[in-house]
Amino acid sequence: MRANLLILGGTTEATAFANAAAEKGLTGTVSFAGRVDRPKRQPLPQRIGGFGGVSGLIEYLHAQKITHVIDATHPFAAQMSRNAVAACAQADVPLLALTRAPWSAQPGDDWTHVPNIASAVAALDQPAKRVMLAVGRMHLAEFAPNPQHFYLLRLVDPPKDPPPFPGHHVLVSRGPFTQDDDRALMQDHRIDLVVSKNAGGTGAYAKIAAARSLGLPVVMIDRPAVPERQEAHSVAEVMDWLRHSGVDLGV
Ligand code: 3Y8
Ligand code: NAP
């Protein structure tokens, strides 16, 4: 069978799978929401922008004759994952999530688990600290109620609006990051608390390892629930899934 893949992207794993698929001569499209100015170049054609909810995604699947969907979005992109489950079920298109296990605390880690962003904000209701807030741009406004802290913000693009707190430093940088760089960053800015999503994977882990090496506490935001779906945790598993569904992957 000739495949025509839709890869819901935006993660290190999505890029890795897109590279492997291109090497095998598979046809497919990598899809981005359009959250950042210049998404990373992909080895397959890419599309940018929402589909228009579940119905828009169903229309896209039919119009583009998509044979398989690989949802390789970030664990916090829960709405996209929900839509993919619903659309693929209704359009009867096979769906596999390429995801990564949550990080778990290692010896030396000092984590406070919170269930969501709002609880992370509540956890910052404490005397002034110097906080590395490395959760991106989209939820910055929710952290406004704690202006007593200094915030080190790491964003993919320069902020269009000033961050909602008086004390802050913006670092425009996209990952993947390294532990040594993140450790130096925390020392340079005299950071004494880190706030992080439990993204899993390798691209955002540098700050977690750096915090451990400096003995810094981390407020760790658990990932949102996503619906039941078949999951893979490696590119090889996705290739096996495609092969078992009749896609000719050559040697
Ligand atoms: C647009 C597409 C690759 C993909 C790389 C991964 C690793 C580097 C680390 C920190 C944490 C954060 C953020 C982060 C990382 C990878 C991966 C990952 C975290 C790009 C990308 C897109 C986005 C969207 C962006 C969000 C933001 C989140 C920055 C590409 C670079 C904080 C998540 O300004 C904005 O609107 C940014 C929005 C969603 C979360 C937020 O709430 O702001 N990612 N990130 C995707 C699209 O349009 O569909 O250019 O590559 C991808 C990557 N970002 O191929 O190497 O796999 O996780 N992304 C978090 O983990 O908290 C940074 O600073 O330590
Ligand atoms: P989300 O909240 O789950 O999705 C909101 C809406 O954005 C979706 O309903 C869909 O719009 C659109 N969308 C999301 N991902 C898309 C994609 N890959 N292609 C096309 N449309 C997409 O998503 P999010 O958390 O904003 O994440 C957006 C993108 O950033 C994803 O590619 C994700 O992998 C990447 N990312 C997110 C995070 C994070 O922390 N959230 C971290 C790293 C990377 P329609 O309903 O109109 O189809």
Image (tube, grey):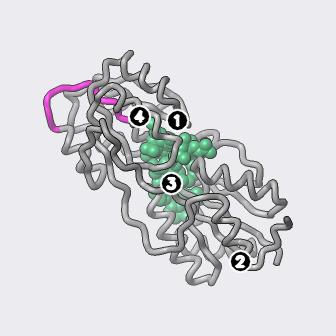
Which numbered disc flags the more N-terminal residue, 3 or 1? 3
* Dot 4 or dot 1, earlier in sequence: 1
Residue at image coords 63%, 43%: 39
Q: Badge 2 is on which residue?
A: 244
Q: Residues within 10 Å of mark 3 (few under 14, many from 20)?
A: many
Contact (Cβ within 8 Å) of mark 2 with mark 3: no
Q: State if disc 4 and disc 3 touch (CB < 8 Å).
A: no
Asked whether, in this view, residue 76 is left or right of residue 6, the answer is: left
Q: Secondary structure at mark 4?
A: helix
Residue 97 vs 135, above or below: the answer is: below
Report the magenta residues as a range: 125-133
Residue 36 in which image quadrant: top right
Which secondary structure, mark 1? Answer: loop
Q: CA distance from mark 4 to mark 1?
A: 21 Å
Disc 1 under 8 Å from ligand 1? The reply is yes
Circle 4 sits on which residue?
209
Give the amino acid at mark 1. Val
